[in-house]
């Protein structure tokens, strides 16, 4: 089952739930495939010139490897065909945002935890 707090983003295909997650291992896999940092890869996805289909499939594949260890890049491509290419970008974006919460969100969470701790005393 997908856990949004851990960065999981789920979707359905082939009558089952799939989970996209950019964990440390998934990001390392991505860096190995692309030969550049995960941040650079993420920034290239937002490029004005667009992203190649091969790169999109590779990024999608890497996000699937954390929860679906036996998946191949071709399997990831088949999933893209099933869910539709227009659905892939938003799923990747959501999973990246979950993996890299903004500093503002982290600060807010820290303040909330601190406030909860003060209330317990």
Image (spheres, helix red, strand yellow):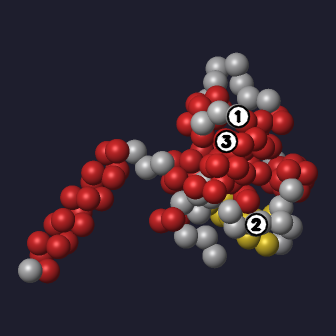
Q: Quadrant of residue 12?
A: bottom right
Q: Residues within 10 Å of mark 3 (few under 14, many from 20)?
A: some
* Quadrant in which the N terminus is drawn: bottom right
Q: Quadrant of residue 42?
A: top right
The front one of 99 and 25 is 25
Answer with left or right where residue 51 lies relative to residue 14: left
Are discs 3 and 1 less than 8 Å apart at CB?
yes
Identify whether 25 is placed above or below 85. below
Q: Which residue is mark 3?
A: 31
Q: CA distance from mark 1 to mark 2?
A: 23 Å
Please report whichever mark, 3 or 2, sits nearer to the chain's N-terminal start.
Answer: 3
Please report whichever mark, 1 or 2, sits nearer to the chain's N-terminal start.
Answer: 1
* Residue 11 is at least partly visible in this image: no
Are discs 1 and 2 less than 8 Å apart at CB?
no
Which residue lies at the image location 86% right of the left edge and 56% below the top edge? Answer: 72
Which residue lies at the image location 19% right of the left edge and 72% below the top edge? Answer: 116
Name the element at disc 2.
loop
Which residue lies at the image location 59% right of the left edge and 63% below the top edge? Answer: 8
Q: Which residue is mark 2?
A: 68
Q: Quadrant of residue 26?
A: bottom right
Q: Please state the horizontal and vertical placement of residue 82, each as a whole percent of the image.
A: 86, 55
* Residue 5 is at least partly visible in this image: yes
Of the numbered discs in the image, which one, if any, rests on residue 90? none
Q: Find the residue positioned furthest to the bottom.
A: 120
Answer with left or right where residue 97 lies relative to residue 78: left
Q: CA distance from mark 3 to mark 2?
A: 18 Å
Q: Which residue is mark 1?
A: 35
Q: Please state the horizontal and vertical placement of residue 103, each as a whole percent of the image.
A: 34, 44
Name the element at disc 3.
helix
Q: CA distance from mark 3 to mark 1?
A: 5 Å
Marks 3 and 2: which is nearer the front?
Answer: 3
């Amino acid at each position: 089952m997908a856990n949004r707090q851990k960065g999981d983003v789920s979707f359905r295909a082939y009558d089952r739930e799939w989970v996209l997650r950019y964990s440390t291992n998934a990001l390392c896999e991505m860096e190995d495939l692309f030969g550049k940092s995960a941040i650079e890869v993420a920034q290239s996805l937002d490029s004005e010139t667009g992203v190649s289909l091969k790169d999109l499939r590779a990024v999608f594949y890497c996000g699937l490897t954390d929860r679906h260890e036996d998946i191949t890049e071709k399997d990831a491509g088949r999933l893209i065909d099933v869910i539709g290419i227009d659905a892939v970008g938003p799923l990747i974006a959501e999973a990246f945002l979950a993996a890299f919460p903004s500093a503002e969100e982290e600060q807010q969470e820290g303040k909330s935890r601190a406030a909860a701790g003060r209330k317990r005393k």
